[in-house]
């Protein structure tokens, strides 16, 4: 069921089936945006509320004009700077984009992924692909084909094998409110990089469960094991010394007899590498039957902000 055959994946998508899609951020559950059957299957498999819209993936910039009614100048600059890549733009949608995909919003979320298999697939298909992350609603996102197979085993005809996702954190989502660039989700492109291209930003990602920012639920990306995010690991370990604890650390191990397992995100202090390793480390920690995962907050700059955002949501109870 895991395959490297792009044409086989295309075959199933043309049959209105849903497949596992590799991207540079996380794996997606992909279907034809114009197939109501495929889109309903995506929502059903994820157990995702129909109020939470899907990102539409395209294989070229030329496709934007088929889907968006208009494109603000700042959006054009962002797409030129970051596509193909982990930047999603919210644009006024054309009537031809099904309301089911956008959950009734008048904007459509568009992105051109920077992954060779995803691009090859998108370019052989006569339609764009809607693809949310390939995890059940609220749980840890998948960064390998095996993660997708573990979540959805029999339900998918194929998962397209594309290796471990090199970014490992979802795309950064940017919209334009009265022309002002607005970040809805921190992601694989640091907001500082977005600002350098689009100008001063506003941020709107703290709304909980509000229809206008449906993806920004507080609890998200979460392991089953209780996760604590702390500034000082030693103090937290002291409090929980009689518990079975695993650590998620930025760049160095701790010396401790009470810790059951430690995951280091980047020994070389590299935030991109830390992002690439984050979800796989959480998946491993979650499989150990721990009482707690204690995670160290990363430096609050660039991708450190995006990783801290995911840790915060994973820790929310
Ligand atoms: O990196 C990514 O973006 C991955 C890969 C597979 O491309 N996809 C992903 O999709 O993270 P998902 O569904 O897990 O997150 C998409 C987010 C959701 O929070 C959703 O609410 C928001 O995008 N979104 C999609 N369309 C929107 C719209 N029209 N208006 C506002 N938010 C939108
Ligand atoms: Mg997701």
Image: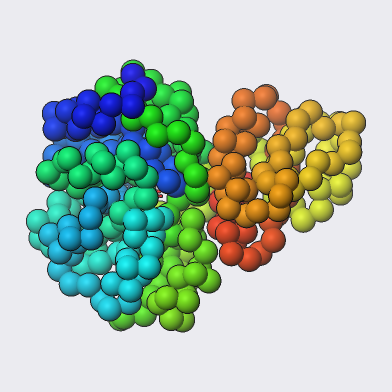
Number of numbered labels in the structure image: 0
Q: How is the image coloured?
A: rainbow
**Which residue occupies 71% across, 50% down?**
268
Q: Is residue 57 left or right of residue 269?
A: left
Q: Percent from the top left, x then y, of residue 137?
A: 42, 39
Q: Percent from the top left, x then y, of residue 5?
A: 28, 26
**Which residue occupies 79% across, 28% down?**
260
Which residue is nearer to you in this view: 279 or 40?
Answer: 279
Occupied quadrant, residue 253: top right
Q: Quadrant of the N terminus?
A: top left
Q: Is residue 225 left or right of residue 178?
A: right
Residue at the far left in the pictured view: 96
Q: Percent from the top left, x then y, of residue 162?
A: 40, 34
Q: Is residue 145 left or right of residue 275?
A: left
Q: Is residue 75 visible?
A: no
Q: Percent from the top left, x then y, of residue 301?
A: 63, 66
Which residue is nearer to you in this view: 61 or 92?
Answer: 61
- Position of residue 112 relative to residue 45, above or below, is below
Which residue is nearer to you in this view: 102 or 127?
Answer: 127
- Position of residue 237 relative to residue 99, above or below, is above
Q: Quadrant of the C terminus?
A: top right
**Which residue occupies 59% across, 41% down?**
277
Q: Is residue 184 visible?
A: yes
């Amino acid at each position: 069921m895991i395959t490297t055959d792009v044409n086989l994946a295309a075959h199933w998508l043309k049959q209105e089936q849903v497949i596992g899609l590799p991207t540079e951020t996380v794996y997606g559950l992909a279907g034809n945006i114009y197939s109501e059957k495929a889109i309903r299957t995506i929502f059903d498999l994820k157990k995702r509320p129909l109020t939470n819209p899907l990102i539409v993936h395209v294989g070229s910039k030329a496709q934007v004009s088929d889907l968006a009614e208009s494109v603000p100048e700042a959006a054009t600059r962002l797409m030129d700077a970051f596509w193909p890549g982990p930047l999603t733009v919210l644009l006024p949608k054309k009537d031809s984009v099904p309301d089911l995909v956008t959950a009734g919003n008048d904007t459509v979320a568009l992105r051109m992924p920077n992954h060779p298999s995803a691009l090859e697939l998108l370019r052989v298909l006569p339609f764009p692909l809607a693809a949310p992350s390939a995890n059940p609603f609220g749980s840890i996102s998948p960064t390998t084909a095996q993660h997708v197979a573990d979540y959805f085993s029999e339900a998918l005809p194929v998962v397209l094998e594309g290796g471990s996702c090199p970014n490992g954190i979802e795309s950064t989502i940017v919209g334009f409110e009265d022309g002002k660039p607005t970040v809805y989700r921190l992601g694989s492109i640091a907001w500082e990089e977005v600002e350098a291209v689009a100008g001063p930003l506003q941020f709107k990602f703290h709304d909980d469960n509000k229809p206008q920012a449906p993806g920004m639920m507080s609890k998200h990306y979460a392991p089953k094991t209780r996760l604590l995010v702390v500034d000082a690991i030693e103090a937290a370990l002291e409090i929980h010394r009689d518990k079975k604890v695993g650590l998620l650390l930025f760049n160095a191990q701790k010396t401790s007899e009470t810790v059951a397992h430690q995951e280091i995100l980047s020994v070389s202090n590299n935030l991109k590498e830390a992002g690439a390793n984050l979800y796989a480390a959480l998946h491993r920690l979650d499989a150990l039957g721990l009482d707690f995962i204690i995670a160290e907050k990363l430096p609050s700059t660039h991708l450190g902000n995006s990783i801290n955002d995911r840790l915060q949501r994973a820790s929310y109870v």
